[in-house]
Image: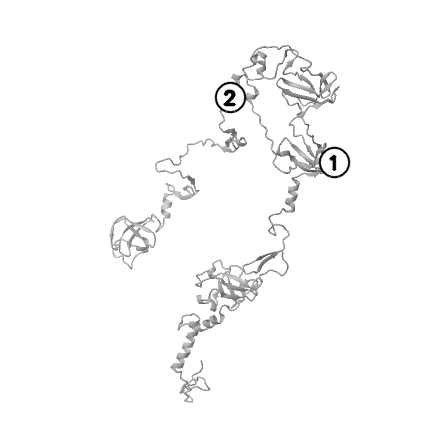
Amino acid sequence: MDYPKSVPGVGLASGKFVDENPATGTPGSLIPAAWGNSVTQEILNVILGAGLVPNEEDVTQLHRAILGLAASDYKKAVRCATTVSIGLSGLQTIDDVTLVAGDRVLVKNQDTASQNWIYVAAAGAWARAQDANESTECTPGHLVPVQAGTKNAGTVWQLVNTTVPVLGTTDLAFERLLGRSGVAAGDYTRVKVNKFGQVEEGSNPTTLSGNGISDAYTKAEADLRDLQRPLRDSITHVGLSNNKPDAPYMRRESDGALVSLQPNLGFTPVQQGGGTGQLDNKVKIGWSNNGLKAMVDATDLGNIWYANNFNPATKADWGTTLASYKITDAYTKAEVYAKSEVDTRLASRALADAISYVGLASGDLGQPYMRRVADSAISWLQTKLGYTPVQQGTGTGQSNNVVKIGWSDNGLKLTVDATDLGRVWYAANFDPNGKANWGTTLAAYGITDAYTKAETDARDAQRPTADSITVLGFAGNDVNLPYMRRASDGQVYYLQPRLGYTPVEQGGGANMSANKVRLGYNGAGSLRLQVDSSDFGDMINDQNLPAKVAALGLGGIGSYAFARVINSQGLVNQGGMVSGTNLIYSSTNGSDGAGNNSGLIGGGTWRAHGAFSGSERTLFQRVG
């Protein structure tokens, strides 16, 4: 494009247009139509090429078109970029950059993302930059370089929308494509990398969790686990042989030899020998079909006589059962009681309870021990006896005095503490010839500390029979928590305490289902209804009805309106339905017409309370 130098008679001076000079009579230059049209068309080509619609009154289109075409996928650099949502007005500080009027700002973090894009800072309200104020100037992939800012200086941000947005309507999203991420230079053992391969964060954690390691214990966790296990002394294992609770053992480290430990007896055994005049011969005492028997080494001493089977002053005892006395009006222990014992150990390592060591002193199989944590005191363990000892004390009427039974030159002797009770009577040294047979009842023998069968039956009849439960009572002695415990699994089931009033039955009536119904006061004068998880709102009553009706307001569901249709629906009888978008408030004034009315109702579904035709007026009620 050039001046129309080739067109004759245009009147150019030095190749340029000049104005008319009346003083000298010099005419002004002419603008040829062809040349003027060419210039205009060239300008239009630029505007159209930028995707703009030519507008005769818009004098900024050529400038914007040039900016748009020149920018291509790169926008002119901005002064700074936001890091959070901001107010789009005033000269503020963004990313530590204090703005001045005219600074270009990339706004990319707005809570309302359709507000994002390039703005020009101003003391008042901000406006989008001239090269960014139309949809055609905001296309996917646009790149925006940032000049300054603590976090964003030297970065390039890309508009990542995948379709052409409508500016001001479509949410605009940006991602950092190039430039600094804000991570200081250095070596890091743990980094966070974004999808572009850029390091977003860097750290040097010193913990397992900080490094994301979940398959290892921390020192504190390992120390805690170690504290729960005793240290070992000259042993490799401690546990239960073949998982049998009656076979505890230790295995010596030096040769793998086993030492069997004595399971807890549950009682204090009688000491063998050591009493006055007693020898160290092995004494065995055990129960037989004929009663309690004694043996010294390999010598059978026969039955032992004791208070339950022999009273030298009154009778000779034949046994320890009711049947042996021909007593038939009392229950035996087997008939009344049941015994059970469960002793199970499940673990490859024993937990330490107030001990630091368990093992063999100096590796000696005969010296198993435990060491107490509190004071390192040693508790020696009993090696397995190889036989079942006689329990010392804890029987009926028995105290905990030390009992010693041992063989002497005169037979089996008995010592309690330091008191020598002399010889023990047994079958080998005493054979009673008979007994005092007083009868077949407890009373006949003067026994008063036992119930007869009839008395026991009467007492049992006063108790309910347990059906699949073990316990019935008050949890924590709280009368508000009655419960039963199920026998099969020990599960507790609470019972309903007496309500103190007659409850309303839920469901069960005509056309009623079993859904859970809840009623409750809302604290504002109304009962509120919920069925299962569905809230049905307030229930209408005398207290809240006036307020509820008043709250319907103009146009609320249930409210009434005197109105007419906008577009005729022909003849409509009472009960007919009309959309609120075809209704307009009206009055009883016959002159009330299209230009004199109260306004469009505009919404809902309304029921006619009177028949009407065409634009006749009637009363409507909103029903939806």
Is residue 365 toward the left or the right of residue 519 in the image? right
Residue 409, visible in the rendered structure: yes
Residue 121, visible in the rendered structure: no
What kind of element bears circle 2? helix
Residue lying at the far bottom in this picture: please name it. Answer: 24
Q: Observer-nearest residue: 119 or 357?
A: 357
Residue at 41% over, 79% down: 38
Which quadrant would residue 585 be assigned to in this image?
A: bottom left
Q: Observer-nearest residue: 36 or 349?
A: 349
Q: Position of residue 522 (x, y in %)?
A: 43, 42
Which quadrant would residue 95 be assigned to in this image?
A: bottom right
Q: Which residue is label 1 attached to? A: 362
Cβ atoms at labels 2 and 1 below 8 Å apart:
no
Q: Which label sits in the foreground, 2 or 1?
A: 1
For badge 1, the amino acid type reads Ser
Q: Which residue is label 2 attached to? A: 460
| Label 1 environment density (alpha carbons within 10 Å; few <14, some 14–19, many ≥20) | few
Q: Position of residue 542 (x, y in %)?
A: 37, 41
Which color scheme does this rendered protein use? one colour
Q: Observer-nearest residue: 588 or 477?
A: 477
What kind of element bears circle 1? helix
Q: Quadrant of the N terminus?
A: bottom left
Residue at 49% over, 68% down: 73
Above or below 475: residue 431: above
Q: Counting residues from the N terminus, which is met first, the one under dot 2 or under dot 1? A: 1
Residue at 36% over, 43% down: 545
Which quadrant would residue 372 be assigned to in this image?
A: top right
